[in-house]
Structure formats: C-alpha cells, structure tokens
C-alpha cells in the first residue's frame, strides 16, 4: 500500500510539472519577437530557425507570414546552415545573382529574397548554436551592413534565453511523460504484486491495453490458448479500475449443465422448477457494479444466448419463475480459446450476440511465441513455490534453462507452473533442479533434440566442461536441422565446414 501511495503522489507531481510548463507561453514570446523585429530593424521578413535534434536539417519554427515549421533548411547548401555551422553572422546582398537554398524557399513561400542578414542564436551557458535569426528584404536597395549585424546580434542575445527555454521545456515535458508512463507501469506492477510477467514485446502490448482499459468500462473479449492466463488478465483489468470492493464474478460456461445455464446467470425464485427450494440471485445480480467474467464463452448453449443478449443490451432481466424486471450494472469480460468469428459462421454462436459481447479484443499469444517470458516466469514460480512448499531449492541447472527456453509448451503458462512444481517437489533443499527430474514430455523432447547427450553436473563450475557440453548439444541440433548436411549445419552454427569437422572429430561424435 505504501508503494502504491508513493507512486500515486509522484504521478500527481509529474502531472503538475507537465501542466505548469506551457509551451504556448514561450511561443507567444517568440512570436512577439517575430512581429517586433521587422519594425525594429526596418525589414520585410524575419524567420527563426532551430536545429532539429538528431537530424541534418534546420526547421523554421517561426516566420513572418508563415505557419510554424513550414520551411526545412538543410545544414549543407543554405546560408542559415553556414551560420549554424560557423557560429558567426553572415550578410548576403544581391541574392538574385546567387544560387542556393533561398531560391527553393522563395518558391515555397512566394517571397523574392534579395538581401539577407543571418545571426546565430547561441546557448546561454555554452557556445553551442541553437538556431539562426534570418532577416530578408526584397528590394536591391535595402541591403544590410555591419551596423545592422551588430544590432541583430544584441537582440539575438536576449532571444536566446527564450529559445533555450523552449527547448528545455520540451525536454522536461518529454521526460515527465516518459517517467509518468513508467510510474504508471510501476504502480500497476505494485497492484498486481508481481503475478504477471511481461518481458516480451507481445505481452508488454497486452499490459498497455490493460492499463488503457482500466479507465474505460468497455466490454472486453480475451482470446488465447488454454493456460495463457486469460482470467488473470481479466482480474488485472478489474483490480486496476479504481473500483475497490466491486465484485468480480467468474463463470466457466463450459462447466455449466445446459439445463441450469439460465438459472445460473439470471437466478430463480423458490418453486420455479423441481429442486428450487429457495430463491437465488443470478450471476448478473451478484456482479452488480463490478465485472462478470465469462470464461470459455464459446461454450455457451445456443438456447440461452437470446436472453443473454437482451440482458447485455438492456442491462436488465428477470429470474426464472418471476416477471419482475431486475436492473443490472455489470461490465462483461469474456474469454475463449476458440475463434468466435468462425463459430458464428458455423452457426455455433449467435452473430448478434457476438457483436454485442465486446468492443475491445485482447489476444494473448501462446508461451512458445514469447520466449522472453519463459525464464522470468520460471524464476517467479520457483520463488512462489519455494515459499508455498517451505523449501529452499537453489535454482535451475543451466541445461534445464536451455530446455525450458526451447520446449514448445503446448500447455502454456499453466504447464510451466506444473513443471516447476514437480521439479521443486522432487529436488532436495540446497540443490539445483535437473533435466532428469522433468516430466516425461520434457525428457522426451530433450532426448529427441539433444540425442541423449549427458549434461554436466550442476555443481561442476568448470567453464571448459560447460562449454564442451553446450557445443555438443548445438552441433547435434544443427546437424538434425540440416538433415545431416555438414555444410548447412556449419552455416547454422556460423563456423566453417572444416571447423565443424574438427569439433566432431575432437568430441568423437557420431554425426
């Protein structure tokens, strides 16, 4: 609670910083300079260029008669680029007799440049050039001289304070937003207490969706294979929605007898059917003000779907054996391992219910498609199971970690949890878990892919022995993938064919 409270206070401060620093205030100040300079310097046009970070271009941030950022001047081949590079003022008269970027700029703006004075805008605290002030005239007679240059350089000194403030302000707002996003993530992690691992880009996207949906009470459909953690995602959406004490009511549609489905969702009155010896609330009533989580929604019988559709549309319904209309106030979060769109096409799911059931869909990828999450999940499970079983298992043997990363995990996260539970249960305190203690499925996978190659002992810290063991396994896998073709296997291993042959001979491998 203390962590969550501190993070919340930090977010409030970040929001205050972002709101109190207004770019518009600085824009107004520099725009004032743009209006003032032509009158003060008796010129027709004034433009201020700022350097874009990490690019080779200058951008016109403000200009007389121009919208912001409409002119992009190159650092090479332009007068303002020369001033930016050299850090000194430049006077160029009689421009119509000279080639350069000014001709292209004239085409873009409709202005006929004849004379120009460009002065650098220096950083207040260093000699770095932040940008350039450019004055322009269209008449040949209105040329610039050293007196104009000195006057503009003095003005540029004052303007540099405003320009640097703009750049600093942009950086502060950018950092504040990034930090606020990270604080939101940390706050989210604190609330979910580390139960959900998301190191892979795919799962980070899922978490980003969850963060968005916590503030929007829209109905959601979560799709994914069995064991991917659909209910956990549903609970995270609910728990982070700022609705303390609101119910989360889960219903597994696949486990309900067809005859009792209607009673389960809508409730019944006493005597409504044989065995109804008392009145009972339905799940819609129980979930009032909170979330009704419908697991395996694709298994819902067709006969109850019309009444279910009406309950969603009207947010009301009635118990079996009663005509009294009961108002509902629930948010639906559904989950399925089926393709509901295909079920609609096959007639196994009502089309109108499909379109009313959810507005946002979350797809949870299987564990085999997000391998970055496997080891963090396994380590998290080990910590949890050690505590639950009151054991002190040292960790995973390196070969076991390799196996975990390469195994396809058809049962997804649920299977990984079961495997770690098995390993913890069968390993003595203080020791590392071994491949030999794995379930039959993982051992068979290891035998098929590593050719039964014996692994180094877990307490053997000899680096050469560990490297030898790893090289043997990789060679066997590469040879298997290349169907015995040594040239192709060498390419997979990123070594020469001769190098592969030497290793096979050295290790006396039968390949």
Image: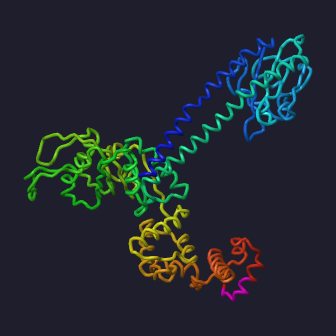
Q: Is residue 245 above or below residue 31?
A: below
* Residue nearest the observer in this picture, 413 or 188: 188
Please give the name of the residue rendered at 71% of the width and 15% of the height, measured from the top-left corner.
Answer: 35
- Residue ranking furthest to the bottom: 508
Q: Residue at x 63, y 81 (%)?
A: 461
Quadrant hosting residue 122: top right
Visual colour scheme: rainbow
Where, quadrant-wise, is the C terminus in this rendering? Answer: bottom right
Q: Is residue 53 above or below residue 39?
A: below
Where residue 111 sits: x, y (%)?
A: 78, 17
Report whether 15 appears left or right of 337. right
Q: Nearer the viewer, residue 156 or 416?
A: 156
How far across and down, in percent of the image, does residue 488 sit? Answer: 70, 73
Q: Nearer the viewer, residue 338 or 244?
A: 244
Count of labels in the image: 0
Q: Is residue 351 left or right of residue 26?
A: left
Magenta region: which residues? 503-510
Q: Is residue 62 magenta?
A: no
* Location of residue 301 by image quarter: bottom left
**What x and y, as percent, mark residue 368?**
51, 65
- The residue at 75%/40% (across/down) is 55
Relative to the observer, which residue lies in front, 232 or 123? 123
Residue 238 shown left or right of residue 300 in the figure: right
Image coordinates for residue 168, horizontal then vertical, percent: 67, 35
């Amino acid at each position: 609670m203390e962590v969550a409270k501190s993070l919340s206070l930090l977010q409030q401060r970040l929001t205050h910083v972002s709101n109190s620093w207004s770019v518009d205030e600085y824009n107004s100040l520099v725009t004032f300079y743009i209006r003032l300079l032509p009158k003060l310097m008796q010129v027709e046009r004034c433009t201020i260029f700022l350097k874009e970070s990490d690019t080779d271009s200058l951008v016109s941030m403000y200009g007389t008669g121009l919208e912001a950022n409409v002119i992009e001047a190159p650092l090479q081949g332009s007068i303002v680029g020369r001033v930016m590079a050299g850090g000194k003022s430049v006077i160029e008269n009689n421009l119509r007799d000279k080639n350069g970027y000014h001709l292209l700029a004239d085409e873009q703006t409709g202005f006929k440049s004849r004379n120009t004075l460009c002065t650098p805008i220096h950083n207040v605290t260093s000699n770095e050039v932040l940008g350039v002030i450019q004055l322009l005239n269209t008449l040949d007679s209105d040329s610039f001289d050293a007196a104009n240059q000195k006057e503009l350089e003095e003005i540029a000194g004052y303007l540099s304070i405003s320009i640097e403030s703009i750049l600093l302000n942009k950086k502060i707002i950018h950092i504040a937003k990034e930090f606020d996003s990270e604080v939101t993530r940390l706050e989210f992690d604190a609330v979910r207490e580390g139960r959900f691992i998301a190191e892979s880009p795919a799962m980070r996207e899922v978490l980003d969706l969850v963060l968005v949906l916590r503030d929007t009470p829209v109905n959601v459909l979560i799709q994914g294979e069995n064991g991917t953690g659909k209910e956990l995602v549903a609970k995270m959406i609910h728990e982070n929605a700022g609705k303390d004490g609101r119910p989360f009511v889960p219903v597994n549609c696949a486990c309900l007898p067809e005859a009792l489905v209607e009673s389960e969702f809508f409730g019944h009155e006493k005597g409504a059917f044989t065995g109804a010896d008392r009145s009972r609330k339905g799940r819609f009533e129980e979930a009032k003000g909170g979330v009704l989580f419908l697991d395996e929604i694709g298994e819902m019988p067709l006969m109850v779907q019309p009444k279910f559709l009406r309950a969603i549309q009207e947010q009301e319904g009635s118990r079996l054996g009663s005509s009294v209309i009961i108002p509902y106030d629930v948010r639906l979060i559904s989950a399925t391992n089926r393709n509901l769109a295909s079920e609609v096409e096959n007639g196994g799911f009502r089309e109108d219910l499909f379109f009313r059931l959810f507005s946002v869909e979350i797809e949870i990828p299987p564990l085999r498609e997000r391998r970055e999450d496997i080891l963090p999940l396994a380590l998290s499970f080990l910590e949890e199971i050690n505590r639950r079983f009151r054991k002190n298992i040292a960790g995973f043997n390196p070969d076991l970690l390799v196996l975990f990363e390469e195994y396809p995990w058809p049962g997804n996260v649920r299977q990984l949890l079961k495997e770690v539970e098995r390993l913890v249960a069968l390993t003595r305190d203080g020791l590392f878990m071994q491949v030999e203690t794995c379930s039959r499925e993982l051992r068979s996978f290891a035998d098929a892919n590593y050719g039964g190659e014996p692994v180094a002992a877990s307490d053997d810290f000899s680096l050469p022995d560990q490297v030898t063991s790893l090289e043997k396994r990789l060679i066997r896998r590469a040879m298997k993938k290349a169907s015995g073709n040594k040239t192709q296997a060498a390419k997979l291993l990123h070594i020469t064919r001769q190098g592969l042959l030497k290793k096979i001979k050295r290790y006396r491998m039968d390949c």
